[in-house]
Image (cartoon, rainbow, N blue to C red):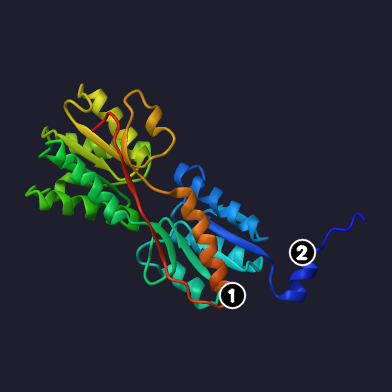
């Protein structure tokens, strides 16, 4: 008959918009883009529409973008950019807006994340098993649980093997290739070359690989290298990257399922997905 429902009119009748807002640091980030694909897929299956915006990991932008989404009468928000201090998320939740976190945990907010402590431990244990005794860590952003948890897990594995990692061997920086290169150059600046580097993000590992190459160091002969997430580039590199696989797509789907439960007035528990070590040629 050529009829199509008017979503605005329906939202007035049901007090629901059928919209879900999603905040990510940068949608160009492969990890967050993959998580968002899972979010969108699950949302469509449940008759929901999604829209996404970038916060660049800046609290002022997070507040502004969240306010914009709330003004559009979203049924709930999914944060992929939560900071450990969880101030912005707290402010949104205090307004009665259902909130779910993906990728990063923060406070007591409901989340769908990977067990990043376990993932870091798997990376550390693998490096220990290959005989490495002078490891370093490219830890990522200090305000993100992914950085802190993955680093913690690796340090626990090294400590269990009797290997103490000095604070100077743990370098924080952006979760991208440029950040990984800068962190690796900092680690190499004092002339003490580590025999292993665990980067808490695949792209940081790629940046580190470039810095090592420029110094004439070979992977894995001189320096073993492990990344995190198992992005599509990891297996296609000239030297395929050993990494920790994170179920990114599934994380997004589970985030939507948790949000639907919150919208319905239920109290779901956070979901912790299991990482997997993928051994290739860099370690």
Residue at point 24% right, 42% down? 198
Image coords of residue 218 (percent x, y)? 21, 24
Of the residues under marks 1 and 2, which one precedes in the sequence?
Answer: 2
* Circle 2: element type: helix
* Circle 1: element type: loop
229 lies left or right of 170: right
Q: Classify the position of the C terminus by image quarter.
A: top left
Q: Quick one: label 1, few (<14), some, or many (20+) residues within 10 Å? A: few
Residue at point 27% right, 38% down? 226
Q: Which residue is mark 2?
A: 7
255 lies left or right of 194: right
Q: Classify the position of the N terminus by image quarter.
A: bottom right
Front position in the image: 164 or 247: 247
**Residue 115 falls in which quadrant of the image?**
bottom left
Q: How many numbered markers are drawn?
A: 2
Q: Which mark is residue 264?
A: 1
Above-or-below relation of 239 to 2: above
Image coords of residue 156 (percent x, y)? 17, 54
Residue at point 13% right, 33% down? 193
96 lies left or right of 71: left
Q: Is residue 26 visible?
A: no
Q: Quick one: label 2, few (<14), some, or many (20+) residues within 10 Å? A: few
Of labels 1 and 2, the one closer to you: 1
Above-or-below relation of 127 to 273: above
Image coords of residue 94 (percent x, y)? 49, 77
Front position in the image: 187 or 110: 110
145 lies left or right of 66: left
């Amino acid at each position: 008959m050529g009829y199509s429902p008017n979503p605005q009119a329906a939202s007035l009748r049901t007090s629901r918009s059928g919209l879900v807002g999603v905040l990510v640091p940068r949608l160009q980030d492969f990890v967050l883009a993959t998580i968002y694909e899972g979010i969108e897929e699950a949302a469509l299956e449940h008759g929901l529409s999604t829209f996404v915006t970038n916060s660049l990991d800046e609290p002022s932008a997070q507040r502004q973008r969240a306010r914009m989404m709330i003004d559009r009468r979203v049924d709930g928000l999914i944060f992929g950019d939560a900071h450990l201090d969880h101030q912005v998320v707290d402010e949104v939740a205090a307004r009665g807006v259902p909130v779910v976190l993906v990728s990063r945990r923060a406070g007591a907010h409901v989340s769908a994340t990977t067990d990043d402590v376990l993932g870091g431990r798997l990376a550390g244990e693998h490096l220990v098993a290959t005989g490495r005794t002078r490891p370093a860590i490219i830890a990522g952003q200090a305000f993100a649980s992914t950085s802190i948890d993955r680093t913690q897990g690796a340090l626990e594995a090294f400590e269990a093997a009797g290997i103490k990692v000095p604070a100077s061997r743990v370098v924080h920086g952006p979760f991208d290739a440029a950040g990984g290169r800068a962190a690796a150059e900092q680690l190499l600046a004092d002339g003490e070359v580590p025999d292993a580097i665990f980067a808490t993000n695949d792209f940081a590992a790629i940046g580190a690989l470039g810095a090592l190459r420029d110094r004439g160091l070979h992977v894995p002969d001189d320096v073993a290298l492990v990344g995190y997430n198992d992005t599509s580039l990891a297996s296609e590199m000239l030297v395929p990257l050993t990494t920790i696989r994170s179920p990114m797509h599934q994380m997004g789907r589970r985030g939507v399922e948790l949000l639907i439960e919150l919208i319905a007035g239920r109290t779901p528990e956070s979901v912790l997905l299991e990482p997997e070590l993928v051994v290739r040629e860099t370690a």
